[in-house]
Structures are given as structure tokens and as C-alpha cells.
Image (spheres, rainbow, N blue to C red):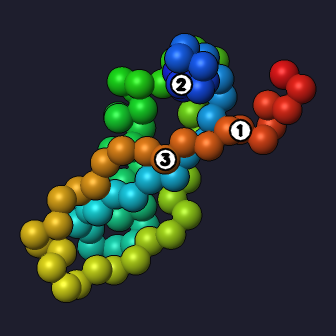
Amino acid sequence: MIRIDDGSGGDSVRRAGFITTRFVRAATPQTAADAAIRRVRRELERIALNTRDEACTVEAEEVRKESSGAEERESGGGFTWFPDDDQQGA
């Protein structure tokens, strides 16, 4: 659950999905995915309104090796939110 501007000048609390990008340094794609998921979960703990019974589902959809300029790159941050399709009719 996340607080979202409902477009009428107010906020509403609703289920939402998100996409985000994180850059991590890791030895393998699996450890990179695990590190990125841990980082995202920590960030969600500060903003998500879910109860303990409604834990967020976080998955790594794509892992890519970046070589050019990777040392100077920031770790990434922020979320792009979209309505949860499963909430239709709720």
C-alpha cells in the first residue's frame, strides 16, 4: 500500500506496483539481484503502508553487467508507481 496523489488535490492509499533500477557491485548476477532486492526492501520499509501480513513482493526482473563508467554511477533510487491490476473491483 502506498499513499498516492489521487489527482483531486488529495491523497489516497492504494495498492500499487512499481519499477525501479538499482546499481550494485557483485561477483555474480544472483548476488547482484539479491543485493538490489535487499536495498529496495529497505527503501520500501520507509514508505510502504503495508501491514506485516501484507508484505511487498520484490523481484529482480533483469540483471545486466555494466562496465563503462560503473564506478562513477550512483546506486539509483526512486520508484515509478502504477496501479495494481489485481485491485480491480476492490
- Amino acid residing under circle 3: Thr
For the question of whether residue 28 can be seen, the reply is: yes
Q: In the picture shown, does residue 84 fall above or below 73?
A: above
Mark 2–mark 3 contact, CB under 8 Å?
A: no
As rendered, which of 1 and 28 lies closer to the eye?
1
Foreground tag (2 vs 1): 2
Q: Closer to the camera: disc 2 or disc 3?
A: 2
Q: In the rendered image, which residue does mark 2 sit on?
A: 5
Q: Residue furthest left?
A: 72
- In the image, is residue 54 above or below residue 87? above
Callout 2 touching callout 1 (CB < 8 Å): no
* Closer-to-camera residue (63/1): 1
Q: Is residue 1 visible?
A: no
Cα separation, mark 2 vs mark 1, equals 15 Å
Residue where numbered disc 1 is placed = 84
What is the three-letter code of the residue carrying label 2?
Answer: Asp
Q: Label 2, secondary structure: give it.
A: strand
Q: Which mark is residue 80?
A: 3
